[in-house]
């Protein structure tokens, strides 16, 4: 488990991370979201001991990162910035990490195989594509077979097959009881991967909740109906105290009543329906609604 308590980081007058308190628990993939500059990378760097908090603390299974012996066996991290020595082959990069963390070198072939880099193990990463670099970063994170994994934008540069692979890998790791904490700007991808969400804006915690609840609480859910007899349906609904809203495309929208009830009322009054569906906003819409006031860098519309 990763635990943050009042974690704060200031750069001069700029507060990048502002009293963040939350826990990332095992068993589910936890998504970490926030607009550009919200403080996600700074938070992740502090978790891995790469940046020192101005105040507050963060612990990995109860201990700060710099107090872990053989840290790679506790937490594996993939951060956006590449930290691969350009002169070493992929295999040697992993070997150095294994040796400094007391990891059995036999694990190297396992992780290279797992990320699909066995064929280029003896090549230098400077010739790697962005996607191959990401895969090597993921191999490094998995090397110590840690209970906690943290990925900053892991799908960056990956092709659709690679994205599918990393999504399933994260889900499998979580299903096996590991703690998986992942940031991404791709909302559709996050919606498919994470079960729990932590959302920050301007360094502050905005939400720490399940994916389903996050969407429900930050969006409008309604029933959409299309009928060739809108007046008759409107009367049938009005008789039951339900007031639909007419949309320019001819559909009716109804809030606060389940789709099943709308269908029953239409059936009772023998009104033909061409469409009856429950509409819920996407994660992207819910995210935009919640973070609207916390966006630091915003382009002008138009
Ligand atoms: N070394 C630094 N010195 C000064 N300011 C910094 C430094 N690192 C980060 N910041 C500032 O702290 C804030 C948070 O940055 P951070 O990179 O953590 O955000 P982020 O959520 O990861 O953003 P993005 O989604 O764009 O990657 C930003 O305003 C950034 O400019």
Image: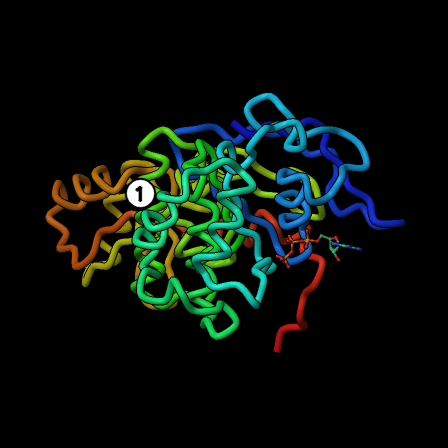
Residue at the far top in the pictured view:
62
Residue at the far bottom in the pictured view:
302
Q: Image quadrant of ligand 1?
A: bottom right
x 33%, y 50%: residue:
109
Which quarter shows the C terminus?
A: bottom right
| Residue 52 placement (x, y as % from top left) | 76, 39
Can residue 190 be spotted in the picture? yes
| Position of 212 relative to 125 (above/below) | above
Which of the two residues, 281 or 191, is positioned nearer the viewer here? 191
- Indicate the quadrant where residue 200 lies: top right
| Residue 25 placement (x, y as % from top left) | 47, 28
Q: Which residue is mark 1?
A: 238
The CB of the residue at mark 1 lies under 8 Å from ligand 1 = no
User: Is residue 45 rendered to the left or right of residue 134?
Assistant: right
| Residue 49 placement (x, y as % from top left) | 67, 39
| Residue 247 placement (x, y as % from top left) | 38, 62
| Position of 215 relative to 2 (above/below) | below
| Position of 20 relative to 124 (above/below) | above
x 53%, y 63%: residue:
88
Can residue 212 be spotted in the picture? no
Q: Secondary structure at mark 1?
A: helix
User: Is residue 108 rendered to the left or right of residue 217?
Assistant: left
x 20%, y 59%: residue:
227
x 31%, y 51%: residue:
114
Which of the two residues, 260 or 56, is positioned nearer the viewer here? 56
User: Is residue 206 rendered to the left or right of residue 147?
Assistant: right
């Amino acid at each position: 488990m990763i635990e943050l308590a009042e974690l704060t980081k200031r750069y001069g007058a700029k507060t990048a991370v502002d009293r963040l308190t939350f826990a990332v628990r095992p068993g589910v993939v936890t998504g970490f979201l926030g607009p550009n500059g919200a403080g996600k990378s700074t938070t992740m760097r502090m978790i891995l001991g790469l940046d020192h908090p101005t105040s507050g603390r963060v612990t990995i299974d109860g201990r700060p990162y710099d107090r872990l012996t053989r840290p790679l066996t506790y937490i594996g991290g993939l951060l956006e910035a590449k930290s691969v020595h350009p002169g070493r082959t992929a295999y040697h990069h992993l070997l150095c990490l294994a040796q400094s963390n007391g990891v059995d070198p036999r694990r190297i072939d396992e992780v290279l195989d797992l990320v699909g880099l066995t064929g280029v193990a003896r090549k230098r990463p400077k010739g790697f594509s962005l996607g191959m670099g990401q895969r090597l970063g993921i191999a490094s994170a998995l090397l110590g077979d840690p209970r906690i994994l943290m990925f900053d934008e892991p799908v960056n540069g990956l092709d659709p097959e690679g994205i599918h692979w990393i999504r399933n890998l994260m889900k499998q790791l979580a299903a096996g009881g590991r703690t998986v904490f992942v940031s991404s700007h791709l909302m559709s991808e996050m919606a498919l991967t994470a079960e729990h969400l932590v959302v920050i804006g301007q360094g502050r915690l905005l939400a720490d909740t399940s994916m389903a609840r996050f969407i429900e609480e930050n969006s409008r859910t309604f029933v959409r109906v299309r009928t060739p007899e809108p007046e008759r349906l409107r009367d049938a609904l009005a008789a039951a105290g339900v007031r639909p809203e007419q949309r320019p495309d001819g559909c009716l929208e109804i809030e606060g009543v389940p789709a099943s009830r709308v269908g029953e009322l239409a059936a009772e009054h023998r009104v033909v329906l061409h469409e009856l569906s429950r509409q819920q906003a996407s994660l992207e819409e819910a995210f935009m609604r919640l973070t609207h006031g916390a966006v630091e860098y915003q382009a002008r519309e138009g």
